[in-house]
Image (cartoon, rainbow, N blue to C red):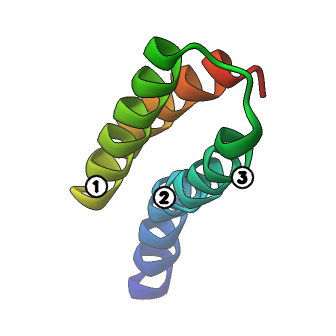
Amino acid sequence: MLRSMLIALSLLAAPAAALANQCPGMMAEIDAALPSANLSEADRAKVMELRARGEQEHQVGDHAASEATLAEAKAILGI
């Protein structure tokens, strides 16, 4: 019974871990695309603000919000 409970708990934790691992990859994509992106100053500032907010959300453990914020930045960048 204990074994079954441990397996169930590990399966519940897996989706959270998967989301946590996506955030750094998304930040890296943004960081790689930003220097060569053809953006207005306003769009560049918005991407940088979203990138910073996404990192903060990731650091406090709000991975769903981080992923959404970083996706918005990626959309502006066209990636």
The amino acid beneath tag 1 is Gly
| Mark before the other along the chain sequence, 3 or 1 | 3
| Mark before the other along the chain sequence, 2 or 1 | 2
Disc 1 crowd, CA 10 A, few/some/many (<14, 14-19, 20+): some
25 left or right of 2?
right
* Residue 49 placement (x, y as % from top left): 34, 32
* Residue 59 placement (x, y as % from top left): 28, 60
Which of 68 and 40 lies nearest the eye of the viewer? 40
| Residue that label 2 marks | 20
Disc 3 crowd, CA 10 A, few/some/many (<14, 14-19, 20+): few
Image quarter of the N terminus: bottom left
Q: Is residue 11 above or below residue 52?
A: below
Give residue 32's mark: 3
52 left or right of 51?
left
The mark lying in front, picked from 3 and 1, is 3
Q: Is residue 46 above or below residue 53?
A: above
The amino acid beneath tag 2 is Ala
Q: Residue sitting at 62 percent across and 47 percent down?
A: 26
The amino acid beneath tag 3 is Ala
Which of 16 and 45 lies nearest the eye of the viewer? 45
* Residue 69 placement (x, y as % from top left): 43, 28
Q: Kindly tell me whether residue 64 is visible in this rendering.
A: no
Q: Residue sitting at 49 percent across and 76 percent down?
A: 4
39 left or right of 53?
right
Q: Residue sitting at 51 percent across and 15 percent down?
A: 43
